[in-house]
């Protein structure tokens, strides 16, 4: 009958590779059926339990305790196996081919002062200290470790940004710098495409696909999964795309992430729009309502992102012309957009497009409830109102037939000194008003003239939805509206992008955080790195013929929390 | 000084066109500055108030009361204007050019038995009755009216579905049948593209864009904005795409809607996949993670939908090959998918793709919190587990390096008699396990053989993410996994689609509601219609040279609610 025996070693630190090797070695011993060697977290206990490897004595173990369990054919064989643990731990050979293993990062930096990079893969609770040490020594950090707090991440990235250094991570599984993979990375052809990715396997999936499609990469920079959270404010992503924009070999930039906060998404798209290079953005699972904003392309999947990037790198691209925005003439404080729609779905599409340009648009048909207008009759901030909603049409004709309500609302909005732009849709066709422009045009002229009397400016933008065969004479409608002073579009999405960019510019555009630019040499010098943590990452660099110094890192006080806190208190005195 | 005077007419019904005309006529009278003529809803009172047209006496008016307000230069002039109201209401000329105006729908049907369509645009509270009457007379309904309850909509559509009739609406603003626009519709070129749209201006925006791009439409069918709600179950949308699929002139089908419930989205995509025709789906604002599922194309905007449809209508298309699913050999009740991922974003992309095929997939990284696994260590239903999440990696190597946890979990899942398919990712590259297939393959073989011993089947699907230059020898990895019995993909999205379609088929696919097919003649016979409600819709049909009978409809008991309920009670006796 199988017997399980457990040994608990309190406050002992061993790295994960050592534990995996110990577990395997134990499983290979005579009479051993199965074995486990893990730290005593709840998840690990649960996993042992499910493998029928968790004697009751293990219950008391805590997060800092090492659990070693052996299931063997007899009590004696299990005890024999546990008796070999120390021997097996010692027997483990290091596979790093390095004459002298420095014990500290600073010694390693003395050995390889030219190294731009420090790879950190120590357990999460030590990672912040090692990364901070690396920044102090003027090195860029590839921070593979997970279980790092958000506060530490923000503080590390802010420090790096001030010093002109990059912190990729935490939980950054992968990157490719100058053709050399850091952490997990596929061997991908060199080529004209540069990536910045918050997601590890997203980066791998897109880089593999680019390779499969026959193209290749300059660099692929990881940022860690939380970089695009509002609190972190995409510090590393911004540094990354800025680097790739300055890198002469990179022709196309690809940005990959899970959907970020709307504020951050907007900010990144605005940042990318300032570049001359095409930028493919894939916020996977993000509901984009447009495929392109000037030089920025919004991809819907990894495959789509890779195809777009390869196409853009090989074919002459058709960027949308940058929109010529005339922000002159508006008064300070004149910043708001008011959209008065007759078409519900046109209002909705406009809201979707605006979310990448102007977050926080109020509506009676809002994208999220927090931006529902408390009173549909009264706008606030940026507002998009659907005047065809049920609330407006009881005993009243639809605004496509009856312009009265829209004209009254237009006057009301124009009187608001904070309003800069009014957006209207004019839907033509059978059933609609036979000549809407004849009623709207005088109201538009009056609104613009009234603003001019107040020494300010009012832009009125109209999107005319119709065909040249519609009964209203589409060109005639456009002419009347233009003569009244409106800027006219015939595609709703184009009108939405125009007004979004205009009010975004009026409110000062997006504030991009400052900081010192990162030196391009860290990307384009032959890769040289210092590795702290998993030996396999050093081995992998050696295989790729990159220079690496592995540090023989041990946690302070051997990982004993109590001792560590005593040492900390002694240092503080 | 301007003076406002109000007159309240209790329980009087006038249609919206009459009220608009009355208001305009009043505004044109001598000394009148502004006027309003609206039913006494809160919204309408509010609007009058904002136009400074709401004397205090109006406060007491209710929803069934007509408010007539005149603001004039003097008390006398205001009173004079109000004194003309009756005369103005009578003077209103009908513009329908029709010798005899029938008073009832049944008389109209006797006059035009060939009419397939009844257009209903009476006020919401009467619309259900008129539409039901039309169905009883065997007619299809274009239901423009809004403010119809969801319960009435469901009941009308179910009745129509059983009778092989179509109810487009309620709140269906637009449709084009055989080249003739109903309600609001642009004059669009005839062509090879058929639309089904839940959104009115969405339909108009896409049809206009198709025209602008040089192509045209067969038919454009509206469904009303609530058709894709789970409760309505897309009854009209299904009938519409089924009709267009059978219509020989339609070469490409386009479906337009705001994002539906995931269950309905899945169901529509599954329905469309059975067709031979290409189907472009634009759930505007829906986060699709794929651009194509076989013959179904997911567009991201109106413009995108129009371009895709025009391209598909003109160029030979490259549909993805239909996947050959082998569902034989599984036992009844073997229906679940279990995904065991090392790559977090691959897991996430898989969840995104599955949502269109298999709603309700549990995960430790779920798309919505309601599908969070209560315990990451234990799967339930369809589950996708990211084994690289922080909870699994404390004191344990990442699953890209250490296969132990994955192999244990694979055994556990394979023992579950309800599991049909296990999905694994195998991420190659520097830093990853040097030969993952060598460890995974035996476990896969064991799992499949164990299922076979139990006289059932187990499919194992592996997606290998890597390049031909990766250190693991990609082809060798694929060969090992295939030899072990796994089906191998090299693009994650393809693997996700395959397993999604397989488990969808195992659970019996999507139940499509039954019902009688709608006769194609209602689309392709020359359009003939009966119009109940807004006269302008009848005029618009006449302009388009379509046959129309306008009904001189009046609400029962003149719109007096009290009288109506007495009549109803008398009928019931």
Image (tube, coloured by chain):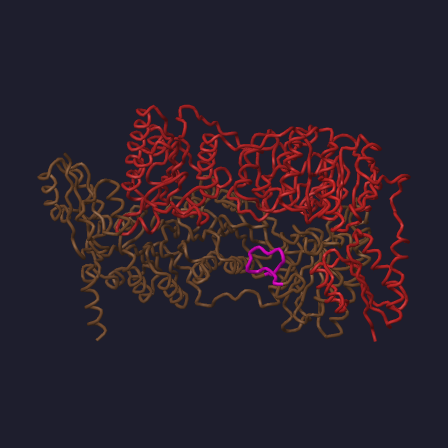
Chain colours: A brown, B red
Identify which residue, A133 or A556, lies in the foreground. Answer: A556
**Can you say which quadrant of the picture contains the C terminus of chain A?**
bottom left
Residue A124 sits in which quadrant?
Answer: bottom left
Residue A303 image offset from top left, x and y in percent: 49, 42
Please give the count of numbered marks on the rendered protein. Answer: 0
Residue B5 sits in which quadrant?
Answer: bottom right
Residue A233 image offset from top left, x and y in percent: 46, 62
Identify the residue at image location x=45%, y=44%. B349
| Residue sitting at the far front | B573
| Up/down of A264 relative to B215, above or below | below
| Up/down of B45 relative to B437, above or below | below
Q: What stretch is highlighted in magenta?
A: A361-374
Asked whether residue B470 is drawn in magenta, I would say no
**Can you say which quadrant of the picture contains the N terminus of chain A?**
top left
Residue B469 seen by the camera: no
Left or right: residue B240 compared with residue A263: right
Residue A176 image offset from top left, x and y in percent: 39, 50
Asked whether residue A372 is drawn in magenta, I would say yes
Residue B494 image offset from top left, x and y in percent: 46, 36
Left or right: residue A53 compared with residue A446: left
Left or right: residue A554 compared with residue B27: left
Residue A163 seen by the camera: yes
| Up/down of B363 relative to A262, above or below | above
């Amino acid at each position: 009958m199988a017997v399980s025996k457990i040994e608990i070693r309190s406050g002992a630190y061993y790295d994960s590779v050592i534990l995996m090797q110990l577990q395997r070695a134990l499983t290979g011993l005579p009479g051993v059926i199965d074995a486990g060697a893990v730290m005593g977290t709840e998840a690990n206990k649960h996993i042992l339990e499910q493998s029928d490897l968790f004697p009751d004595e293990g219950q008391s173990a805590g997060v800092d305790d090492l659990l070693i369990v052996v299931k063997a054919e007899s009590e004696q064989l299990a005890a024999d196996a546990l008796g070999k643990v120390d021997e097996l731990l010692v027997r483990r050979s290091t596979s790093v081919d390095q004459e002298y293993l420095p014990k500290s990062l600073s010694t390693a930096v003395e050995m390889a002062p030219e190294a731009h990079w420090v790879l950190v893969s120590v357990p999460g609770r030590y990672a912040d200290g090692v990364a901070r040490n690396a920044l102090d020594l003027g090195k860029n950090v590839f921070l593979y470790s997970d279980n790092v707090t958000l506060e530490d991440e923000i503080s590390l990235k802010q420090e790096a940004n001030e010093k002109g250094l990059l912190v990729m991570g935490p939980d950054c599984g992968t990157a490719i710098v100058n053709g050399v993979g850091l952490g997990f990375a596929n061997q991908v052809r060199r080529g004209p495409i540069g990536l910045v990715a918050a997601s590890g396997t997203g980066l791998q999936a897109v880089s593999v696909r680019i390779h499969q499609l026959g193209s290749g990469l300059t660099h692929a920079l990881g940022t860690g999964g939380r970089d695009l959270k509002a609190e972190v404010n995409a510090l590393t992503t911004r540094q990354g795309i800025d680097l790739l924009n300055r890198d002469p070999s990179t022709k196309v930039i690809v940005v990959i992430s899970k959907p970020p906060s709307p504020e951050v998404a907007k900010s990144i798209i605005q940042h990318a729009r300032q570049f001359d290079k095409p930028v493919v953005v894939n916020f996977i699972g993000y509901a984009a309502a447009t495929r392109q904003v000037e030089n920025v392309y919004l991809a819907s999947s990894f495959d789509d992102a890779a195809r777009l990037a390869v196409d853009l790198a090989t074919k002459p691209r058709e960027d949308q012309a940058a929109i010529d925005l005339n922000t002159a003439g508006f008064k300070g404080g004149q910043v708001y957009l008011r959209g008065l729609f007759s078409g519900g779905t046109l209002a909705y599409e406009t809201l979707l497009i605006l979310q990448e340009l102007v977050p926080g648009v109020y509506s009676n048909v809002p994208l999220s409830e927090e931006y529902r207008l408390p009173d549909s009759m009264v706008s606030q901030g940026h507002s998009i109102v659907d005047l065809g909603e049920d609330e407006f049409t009881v005993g009243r004709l639809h605004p496509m037939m009856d312009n009265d309500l829209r004209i009254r609302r237009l006057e009301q909005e124009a009187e608001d000194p904070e309003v800069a732009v009014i957006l209207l849709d004019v839907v033509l066709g059978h059933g609609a008003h036979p000549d809407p422009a004849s009623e709207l045009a005088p109201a538009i002229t009056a609104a613009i003239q009234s603003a001019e009397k107040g020494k300010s400016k009012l832009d009125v933008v109209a999107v005319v939805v119709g065909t040249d065969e519609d009964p209203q004479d589409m060109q005639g409608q456009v002419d009347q509206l233009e003569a009244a002073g409106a800027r006219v579009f015939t595609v709703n999405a184009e009108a939405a992008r125009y007004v979004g960019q205009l009010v975004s510019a009026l409110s000062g555009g997006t504030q991009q955080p400052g900081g010192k630019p990162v030196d391009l040499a860290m990307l384009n010098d032959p890769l040289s790195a210092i590795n702290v943590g998993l030996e396999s990452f050093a081995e992998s660099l050696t295989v790729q013929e990159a220079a690496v110094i592995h540090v023989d890192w041990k946690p302070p006080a051997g990982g004993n929390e109590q001792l560590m806190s005593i040492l900390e208190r002694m240092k503080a005195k």
